[in-house]
Image (cartoon, coloured by chain):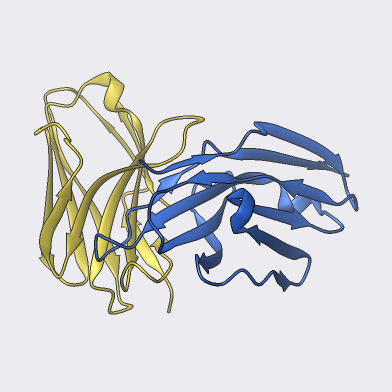
Chain colours: A blue, B yellow
């Protein structure tokens, strides 16, 4: 069965600090997709990144970067020079390919609090 | 336009009421989803519609009844709910399993 673990329940940092959110997943599928979503207090889940199981290239988008390591089943997310607006709950999620549509399994989320 | 619109944003209903949640997307996505999120928990999948047909029902109680009138609309009909059904109900859509799902802002439901 598929499972996503986000061991960090809550992280507090001061603005401009770098922070890494950890995500470890379990799946028996060879083709799968990993996602990160941000959920601000308003409630909407905001898509950040999608990575398929065959693409282990790391990605950088502005202050955000992602490190996908298949060998350790991890897909970690780093925010560089954090800002107050980054405060939110961040979810890592997994979707397997055998259903024909997305069936997201979410981790328990990491609440990030960035203080000024 | 990458928007999924949900109405209403907030809903308070009694246990004997019947109400409906609505969701709309105009991205041409063929899959639409209902998720339920309790406070401080991750979203949990309830239903999946693929090409306007119900594809997945995650053993959801029959007091929740989904409906997909067309490819852009998704409804969730609520009847005889319990206080423990109070949660944030999120609608999402995606093109297929390879692409990301876009979520609406959700409906915060309180059952009294």
Residue at the extreme front = A71
Image location of residue A57, percent across then percent down: 65, 72
User: Residue, x 69% and y 55% (percent of image)?
Assistant: A77
**Residue B57 in view:** yes
- Quadrant for residue B107, please give it: top left
**Residue B112 in view:** no
Total labels: the figure holds 0
- Quadrant for residue A3, please give it: top left
Q: Nearer the viewer, residue B41 or A8?
A: A8
Is A8 rendered above or below residue A114? above
User: Residue, x 43% and y 74% (percent of image)?
Assistant: B2
Q: Quadrant of the C terminus of chain A?
A: top right
Is B47 rendered above or below residue B104? above
Q: Is residue B36 left or right of residue A37?
A: left
Q: Nearer the viewer, residue B87 or B33?
A: B33
Is A42 rendered above or below residue A65? above
Image location of residue B79, percent across then percent down: 11, 33
Image location of residue A74, percent across then percent down: 62, 50
User: Residue, x 21% and y 55% (percent of image)?
Assistant: B48
Q: Is residue B90 left or right of residue B39?
A: left
User: Residue, x 89% and y 49% (percent of image)?
Assistant: A17
Is A26 rendered above or below residue B6? above
Q: Is residue B58 left or right of residue A75?
A: left
Image location of residue A37, percent across then percent down: 54, 55
Q: Quadrant of the N terminus of chain A?
A: top left
């Amino acid at each position: 069965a598929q499972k996503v673990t986000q061991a960090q329940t809550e992280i507090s940092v001061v603005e401009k600090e770098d922070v890494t959110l950890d995500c470890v997943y379990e799946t028996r599928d060879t083709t799968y997709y990993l996602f990160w979503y941000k959920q601000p207090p308003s409630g909407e889940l905001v898509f950040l990144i999608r990575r398929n199981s065959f693409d282990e290239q790391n990605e950088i988008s502005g202050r955000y970067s992602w490190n996908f390591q298949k060998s350790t089943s991890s897909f970690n997310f780093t925010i560089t020079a954090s800002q107050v607006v980054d405060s939110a709950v961040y979810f890592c999620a997994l979707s397997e390919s055998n259903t024909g549509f997305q069936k997201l399994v979410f981790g328990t989320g990491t609440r990030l609090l960035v203080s000024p | 336009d990458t928007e999924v619109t949900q109405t209403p944003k907030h809903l308070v209903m009694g246990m004997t009421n019947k109400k409906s949640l609505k969701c709309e997307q105009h991205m041409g996505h063929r899959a639409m989803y209902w998720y339920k999120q309790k406070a401080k928990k991750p979203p949990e999948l309830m239903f999946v519609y693929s090409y306007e047909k119900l594809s997945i029902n995650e053993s959801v109680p029959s007091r929740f009844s989904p409906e997909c009138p067309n490819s852009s609309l998704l409804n969730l009909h609520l009847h005889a709910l319990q206080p423990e059904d109070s949660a944030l109900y999120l609608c999402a859509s995606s093109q297929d399993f390879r692409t990301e799902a876009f979520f609406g802002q959700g409906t915060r439901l309180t059952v009294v």
